[in-house]
Image (cartoon, helix red, strand yellow):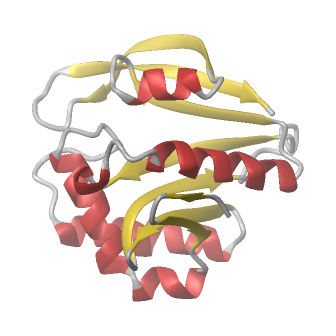
Amino acid sequence: MIAVPQTTIAILPANDIARRARELAAVLHACVHAGASVNFILPFSEDDAGGFWIQKVLPAVCAGARTLLVAEIGGRIAGTVLLDVDTPPNQPHRAEVSKLLVHPDFRRRGIARALMADLERLARAMGRSLITLDTRTGDAAEPLYASLGYQAAGVIPGYCRDPFDHTLDSTTIMFKAL
């Protein structure tokens, strides 16, 4: 576990995902409404966000395909990141990062960096030596990942819809050897 001032990073067990779904939904909802390009577009309700954690994440966590790390401050979930290890048989050395989210109320405190550090430790412990991810090209997350040692493999134009309008944004595919 890594600690930054008043922040604790921990794995959220499957049995706690349903119990804390409203808190998880609040983080995802706030991030999407702040412009995060994390698969969702407006309108996006807290019920929609809760459905993601219960319908998509919980079954994958129960199956051992994903691990959910959360950052807590004062007992409140301030951030999340998912480690996806559901890779094909020819890629048992690889894992993927998704849903690195920090609630707008808690940004600029090193939470994203701390979540990624613990995610990488977990990936190593699981025998993974390559981490991949994608991020909207030009987002604040792109230089964060670069500062953590992730390298851009390339850019795919027109990859996803902007959360606010119908424009298409590019995505940068990134990787890091552990």
Can you give x and y, in whole percent of width and height, for residue 70 in the image? 50, 65
Picture mark count: 0
Question: Is 127 left, or right, of 145 in this rendering?
Answer: right
Q: Position of residue 25 (x, y in %)?
A: 29, 68
Q: Say if 30 sits above or below 108 in the image.
A: below
The quarter in which the N terminus is drawn is: bottom right
Q: Would you place residue 16 above or below residue 99 in this image?
A: below
| Residue occupying the point 22% across, 59% down | 29
Residue at image location 58% in from the left, 81% down from the top: 14
Front residue of 46/103: it is 103
* Quarter-of-image position of residue 165: top left
Q: Residue furthest front?
A: 5
Left/right of residue 143 with respect to residue 170 in the rendered view: right
- In the image, residue 19 lies at what x, y percent? 42, 89
Residue 108: percent from left, percent from top: 34, 42
Q: In front: 147, or 178?
A: 147
Q: Is residue 41 left or right of residue 175?
A: left
Q: Residue at x 81, y 34 (%)?
A: 178
Residue at 40 percent of width and 79 percent of height:
75
